[in-house]
Image (spheres, rainbow, N blue to C red):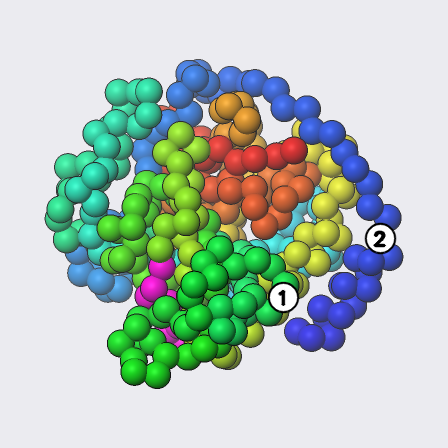
């Protein structure tokens, strides 16, 4: 990956950066759905019997039988991109986004979950399961990795908790000699997947789950950094002192930013014509898959934007990053995540920010 990273970095440096203004407009779902809502059924996958139960849901899926419109990450190729988008840098961006996609597993439901979505009478997911030990899975994406030593970020960024001088992962919390070197990173998911710190304490992340036989890599120490129900977004702060894992994530994240920069403005002027959208998620909590489609409508929510799209999703896809090609000029921080499925058959996102 190192040589590929260097080549892309040089290409990125040489590329002329152009600024662009984004003009967002309101639109209605052509299938007749009220655009004032964009709220439907969530797509977290509930599970009662662990991994075997998740695979059973995958096999018996009613929304996308056979999952023929999903592409396993290890078989994804340039030819899977739509005509007019078979660009090697866009391909690298999709692969880089896949590398940073993780499965989010939650074992408990917060007693503080609201009855309804804000300013609606639409039931909020899992309200009736408060206090209960429930098992559900969604998806998320890693961003913004920092190597820390003695409480100081080694990349020069400010640390939001300068009083912390030792690793705070589960292993170090129970150790008499916690590590003074660790890595912190953030994860975007949906607020209906992880609602608050009560649920975060019962949340684990499985990374690099590309195939059934992928090594099990788990991060089990996370906390809520930010949550917003109006936007259906949750940002988790995560930690590890595993040097191999920390360095691997940092390299993947750097590669993702470079790949994004190479296609950042390439599709700006055709984004409303081709409307390409891609999502990488863990359908039914099983190995990650890539799906490609088109966005259909968009709606402004305060200073953010929600999208509907035909891009295939399944239970387990909630919280996955939604990439509307030509729109996200903040690759690391748009906070646009998959939220659910509307009655008209379209899928929809939470609200992301786009300058």
Q: Quadrant of residue 191?
A: top left
Q: Quadrant of the N terminus?
A: bottom right
Horizontal arrangement in the rendering, residue 209 relative to residue 173 (left or right): right
Q: Nearer the viewer, residue 183 or 60?
A: 183
At horizontal 71% and vertical 68% (from top left) the residue drawn is 5
At horizontal 33% and vertical 20% (from top left) the residue drawn is 119
SS class, disc 2: loop
Task: Name the residue that disc number 1 marks.
Answer: 155
Q: Position of residue 82 (x, y in %)?
A: 66, 45
Task: Name the residue that disc number 2 marks.
Answer: 15
At horizontal 57% and vertical 58% (from top left) the residue drawn is 158
Query: Is residue 294 positioned above or below 82 on the image?
Result: above
Q: In the image as oriented, which residue stretches furthest toward the front?
A: 163
Query: Is residue 172 positioned above or below 107 on the image?
Result: below
Horizontal arrangement in the rendering, residue 186 relative to residue 108 (left or right): right
Upstream in sequence: badge 1 or badge 2: 2
- Secondary structure mostly seen in magenta is loop
Q: Residues within 10 Å of mark 2 (few under 14, many from 20)?
A: few
Q: Which residues are magenta?
A: 213-222
Q: Is residue 30 magenta?
A: no
Q: Quadrant of the C terminus?
A: top right
Query: Is residue 176 positioned above or below 286 on the image?
Result: below
SS class, disc 1: loop
Q: Residues within 10 Å of mark 1 (few under 14, many from 20)?
A: few
In the picture, the disc for residue 200 is none
Q: Position of residue 269 (x, y in %)?
A: 76, 33
Q: Quadrant of residue 259?
A: bottom right
């Amino acid at each position: 990956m190192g040589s590929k990273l260097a080549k892309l970095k040089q290409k990125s440096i040489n590329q002329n950066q152009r600024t662009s203004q984004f003009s967002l407009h309101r639109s209605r779902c052509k299938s007749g759905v009220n655009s004032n809502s964009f709220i439907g059924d969530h797509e977290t996958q509930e599970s009662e019997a662990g991994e075997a139960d998740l695979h059973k849901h995958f096999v018996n899926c009613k929304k996308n039988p056979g999952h023929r419109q999903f592409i396993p990450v290890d078989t994804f190729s340039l030819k899977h991109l739509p005509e007019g988008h078979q660009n090697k840098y866009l391909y690298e961006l999709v692969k880089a986004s896949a590398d940073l996609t993780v499965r989010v597993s939650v074992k408990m439901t917060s007693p503080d979950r609201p009855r309804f979505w804000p300013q609606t009478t639409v039931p909020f997911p899992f309200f009736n399961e408060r206090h209960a030990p429930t098992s559900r899975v969604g998806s998320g994406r890693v961003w913004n990795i920092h190597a820390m030593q003695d409480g100081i970020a080694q990349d020069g960024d400010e640390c939001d908790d300068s009083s912390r001088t030792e690793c705070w992962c589960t292993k170090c919390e129970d150790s008499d000699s916690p590590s003074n070197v660790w890595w912190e990173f953030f994860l975007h998911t949906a607020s209906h997947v992880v609602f608050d710190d009560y649920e975060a304490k019962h949340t684990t992340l499985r990374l690099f789950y590309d195939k059934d036989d992928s090594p099990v890599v788990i991060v089990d120490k996370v906390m809520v950094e930010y949550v917003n129900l109006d936007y259906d977004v949750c940002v988790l702060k995560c930690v590890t002192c595993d040097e191999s894992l920390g360095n691997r994530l940092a390299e993947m994240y750097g590669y993702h930013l470079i790949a994004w920069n190479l296609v950042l403005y390439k599709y700006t002027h055709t984004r409303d014509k081709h409307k390409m959208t891609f999502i990488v998620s863990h359908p039914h909590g099983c190995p990650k898959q890539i799906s490609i489609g088109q966005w259909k409508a968009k709606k402004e929510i305060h200073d953010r934007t929600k999208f509907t799209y035909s891009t295939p999703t399944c239970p387990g896809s909630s919280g996955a990053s939604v990439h509307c090609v030509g729109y996200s000029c903040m690759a690391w921080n748009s906070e646009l995540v998959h939220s659910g499925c509307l009655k008209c058959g379209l899928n929809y996102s939470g609200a992301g920010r786009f300058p």
